[in-house]
Amino acid sequence: MFIELPSELETALIDLPLPMWELEGPSLARTTTRQYRSELAATPLFEETVATLRHSLTGEGGGYAVLRLGNLAKALGTDDGRFLRLATGFAAEVAVPFSPFPRWPLWKDIGVKIDKDPGKSSGIGYNAFHMDLVNASLPPDYTTLLCVRRDPLGGGPSILSDAHAAVARLSQGCRTLLAESAYHYGTFFDLVGVGEEYKPFPILDGPDAGAGFVRFTAKMLERSELGQAHVEAARELAEELVRGQVSFMLQPGDYLIVNQRRFLHGREALHSGQETVPVADRRLLLQLFLRAGDSVG
């Protein structure tokens, strides 16, 4: 769902100087959250906009939203701390912002590196459907991406798919295999606020087919040693995810928020010729994770 800000709200937010945030461990400090909420709640139509945002993320049939902050980005500049504080304020209305990476700031840059694995988030190729931090016992409830620059050559649309709807289209036998703790992917190092390493893990990690995480990353099909039956079950899920995908191009200022308990995300390949684009002009996203509840453990 795309959510446009009312013009009255945009005007008020442009003139709203939110203070610098503070952290409590890996999380946005409660004092900052309260301060942001107090300031933002006084602006016209903020509460109504946030209610729409929350419903699009957790209401029936929902699971993701794109908050269109483009006019704020144009007015303030995406490199202005005021703009990032406003985006953080909206995020804090959904859940608790936190960084699982001690070596990174609250918002992590995802730029374009032509020498990286093309399938990585910072690569130039197809970034297949996945859940962030799939091998953590407490993965982020939400992953969010703020578009600073789109691919100037026109590639890299975002892709999303309803994970539980995809699972529901599979056979019972396939779902049984996906619910077995037979899968593993990636390393687990220097992380905070996301529990412990989960290895092996089930793809279907919840009480039933309509709840809980769908712990899936298409990369596990190539980089994990799995039995053939489990590989085939995961491949069928991958095909259903692609069959049900939605695709759109994020514009500068667009803020994508994904409920990881419902949707998986990815990205189509960037346009060829990235080596001709100066680094400062390449696609750039900022990533922020959110934890439902009052704290990050």
Image (cartoon, rainbow, N blue to C red):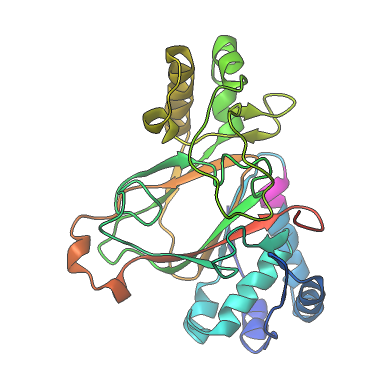
**Front residue (pair 79, 161):** 79
**In this rendering, position of residue 108 left or right of residue 113:** right
**In this rendering, position of residue 135 left or right of residue 126:** right
Indicate yes or no whether the magenta region holds residue 228: no
> Looking at the image, which residue sits at the far front?
189
Q: Position of residue 275 (x, y in %)?
A: 19, 63
Query: Majority secondary structure of the magenta segment?
Result: helix
**Front residue (pair 183, 46):** 183
Query: With respect to residue 295, does 264 lie above or below?
Result: above
Query: With respect to residue 293, does 9 lie above or below?
Result: below
**In this rendering, position of residue 294 left or right of residue 84:** right
> Looking at the image, which residue sits at the far top?
173
Q: Position of residue 276 (x, y in %)?
A: 17, 67
The part of the image, by quadrant, that contains residue 101 is bottom right
Query: With respect to residue 157, does 176 lie above or below?
Result: above
**Residue visible at 82% across and 78% down?**
38
**Residue visible at 50% across and 78% down?**
73
The magenta segment: 55-59
**In this rendering, position of residue 183 left or right of residue 7:** left
**Front residue (pair 188, 42):** 188
Total numbered labels placed on residues in the image: 0
**Residue visible at 34% across and 46% down?**
119
Query: With respect to residue 202, does 256 lie above or below?
Result: below
**Residue visible at 73% across and 72% down?**
46
The part of the image, by quadrant, that contains residue 100 is bottom right
Q: Position of residue 60 (x, y in %)?
A: 71, 40
Q: Position of residue 280 (x, y in %)?
A: 31, 76
